[in-house]
Each structure stands twice: as structure tokens, then as C-alpha cells.
Image: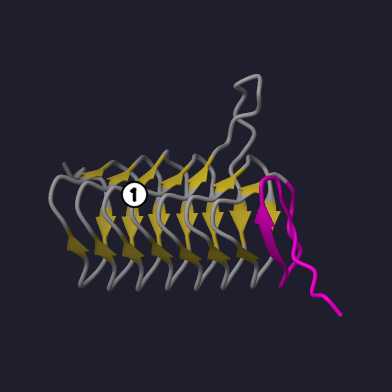
Amino acid sequence: MISEKAVIGKNVSIGAYCVIEEGVVIGDNTTIKNYVELRKNTIIGENCYIDSRVSTSGDCKVGNNVTVRYASILARGVEVGDGTYICPKVMTNNLNTGQAQIGGAKIGRNCFIGTNTVLQHGITLGDNVITGSLSFVNKNIPEGEIWFGNPAKPYKKEK
């Protein structure tokens, strides 16, 4: 189902069984695979690759040249910077423990988010950040740092 009120750019490929709601904008030269759900007011930039079974909760902004791999979930209000690579099964949320919506994660440019990582609500990842697979990120990560673990902590090189 593709809403008549969605804006689809040039040379966009959309797979089977997708849900694209009103207010969604998809930039030029973007690939949307099968079973993708893009909820109201999601913006996908140009030259992006959105893999099968990815879903957004709406009001998300994905920059240009972004890859979002299989079965990842972008919660309401998540922002993803240009050139970022999100591995399979990454989950973001925008709810605190009282179930109040407080905003999704802000992911900088040229980041790499490892497989099965969880990004908590309201956090910010600086540009060029790497998170390891299976990480639980519940704090802001400064630009250029590598974090991993549960909870995620900064990688420190041994001397």
C-alpha cells in the first residue's frame, strides 16, 4: 500500500508488500526492499538502501547515502545523518520507562551501528561513531568514538 500523498523521487525501486503512508518522502535513486513500513512523515534521503522488514514509527529523518539493513526499527523522531550504515536488527526507541514519548536517537554522519544494537531514547551519537554488535547504548557518544557492550562503554586502546 503506497499512499497517494507520499512523495516518491526519481529512479526509486519499491519492493513487494510495503506500507508507505501519507507524508512520506523518498529521495531519488533509493531502493526500498520488501515488507518495509514507512509510517507518516518519514523522510528518506537520496541514494539510500532500505532493506527488507525495516520499519519506522513515523516522523523519522534519514539522510542521504544511508543503508538500513534487514529488520531494523527506527522509532518515532529518530534522525540518521548522511553516510551512516545501520546493520541488521538495530532497534531504537523513543519511550522512557513511564511510556512517555521523549524523542528518538539522533545519529550523526558516517556512523556504523552494529548488528542487534539497541539505541535508547533521546541519545545523540556524534559523527563517525562506531557501536559494536549486541550493544545497548544508553548514553550520548562523542564524535569519532567506538563504544560496545551492555551497557555500551568506550573502547580504550591498550598502551
Horizontally, is 153 left or right of 60 in the view?
Answer: right
Tell me the residue at 16%/56% (across/down): 15
- Queried whether the magenta region covers residue 11, the answer comes back as no
Tell me the residue at 76%/63% (across/down): 142
Count residues near mark 1 (Cα–Cα under 10 Å), then give few for <14, some for 14-19, many for 20+. Answer: many
* Quadrant of the snapshot with the C terminus: bottom right
From the top left corner, tell me how far across and down residue 91 is, in percent.
49, 45
Chief SS of the magenta region: loop
Q: Residue 66 lies in what quarter of the image?
A: bottom left
Q: Residue furthest front?
A: 159
- Queried whether the magenta region covers residue 148, the answer comes back as yes
* Quadrant of the snapshot with the N terminus: top left
Q: Tell how many labels.
A: 1
**Residue 97 higher or lower than 16, as above or below:** above
From the top left corner, tell me how far across and down residue 150 is, in percent.
66, 46
From the top left corner, tell me how far across and down residue 60 is, in percent.
47, 48
Q: Residue furthest bottom?
A: 159
Q: Residue furthest left?
A: 16
Tell me the residue at 12%/51% (across/down): 16
Horizontally, is 93 left or right of 126 in the view?
Answer: left
Horizontally, is 102 left or right of 139 in the view?
Answer: left
Q: Residue 12 lies in what quarter of the image?
A: bottom left
Query: What coloring was used for the rendering?
Result: secondary structure
Viewer-proximal residue, 159 or 17?
Answer: 159
Q: Residue furthest right?
A: 159
Q: Secondary structure at mark 1?
A: loop
Tell me the residue at 30%/58% (across/down): 51
Could you tell me the amino acid type at mark 1? Val
From the top left corner, tell me how far across and down residue 158 is, in percent.
82, 75
> Which stretch is magenta?
139-159
**Which residue carries the number 1 mark?**
54
